[in-house]
Image: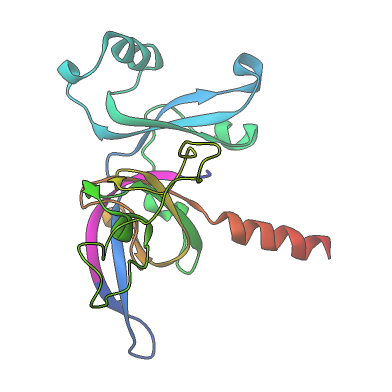
Amino acid sequence: MKGLIGKKVGMSQVFVEGGNMVPVTVIDITSLIVVGKRTPEKDKYSAVTLGFGVAKEKRLTAAQKGSFKKAGAPGRKIVKEFRMSAEEVAKLNVGDEVKADLFIKGQMVDVTGITKGRGYQGVMKRWSFRGFGQTHGTHEYRRHPGAIGQRKTPGRVYPNKKLPGHYGVEQVTTQNLEVIEVITEKNLILVKGGIPGHNEGVVIVRPSIKSAIRESHKKKK
């Protein structure tokens, strides 16, 4: 399987061999099950659909209720599809619980989540601008963005100009995080360092794409 859906519980710390303390983020994948399958015969490709988080029936749309009923799976809040080989898909059944042991200790992973919302921010916080020099002649201009025009021509501000605005609530992927520990009995994964999002936020955990590329290059050599 190419990934998992989980919930960011929060940060903690563990002590590894040698007595070093390592900050970790705890990811909980309890309630993650298989809610659908895609096969080459029927869908022209192979994949598995995972569902996370028990959903109340009144919170589901009519289309969602029909989809879960047709698949014979209980309702879930978050549903995501992961591509897999046909052989791997054949081993799974709708309703199967997915465990944390998909990943192993020491493996590198990529974690995708929605960042915290930080409201309307200026260019220094939003884009890491340096700001204006603080001298005796500077008046109320220390945190301004500076000139944004292009003189007379073209007489407008270019699209995507870095300006103040809403900051956060964006999908971000943090790559190459090491799996420090996998607690299978509690369905917890401990990854080194921080990951995007607030506590209780939903995250996607996948094997590291960069590590996969490195391995493929080694095999070619």
Instruction: Give the residue furthest to the right.
Output: 221
Residue drawn at x 67%, y 57% as measured from the top left: 213
Q: Position of residue 10 (x, y in %)?
A: 22, 59
In the image, what residue occupies the spot 48% across and 69% down? 106
Vertical arrangement, residue 177 with respect to residue 151, above or below: below
Which quadrant is the C terminus positioned in?
bottom right
Q: How was this image coloured?
A: rainbow
Q: Is residue 117 above or below residue 135?
A: above
Q: Which residue lies at the image location 63% right of the left edge and 31% below the top edge?
A: 86
Q: Is residue 30 above or below residue 142?
A: above
**Front in this rendered view, residue 43 or 168:** 168
The magenta span reads: 4-12
- Magenta region includes residue 127: no
Q: Is residue 214 left or right of residue 22?
A: right
Of the pair 146 and 208, the residue shown nearer to us:
146
Quadrant of residue 13 within the rendered picture: bottom left
Q: Position of residue 151 (x, y in %)?
A: 50, 46
Dominant secondary structure of the residues highlighted in magenta in the image: strand
Q: Is residue 194 left or right of residue 45?
A: left
Give percent across and percent down for residue 43. 60, 17
Instruction: Indicate whether residue 8 is drawn in magenta.
Output: yes
The number of numbered discs placed on residues in the rendered structure image is 0
Task: Tell me residue 165's x, y (percent).
Answer: 29, 44
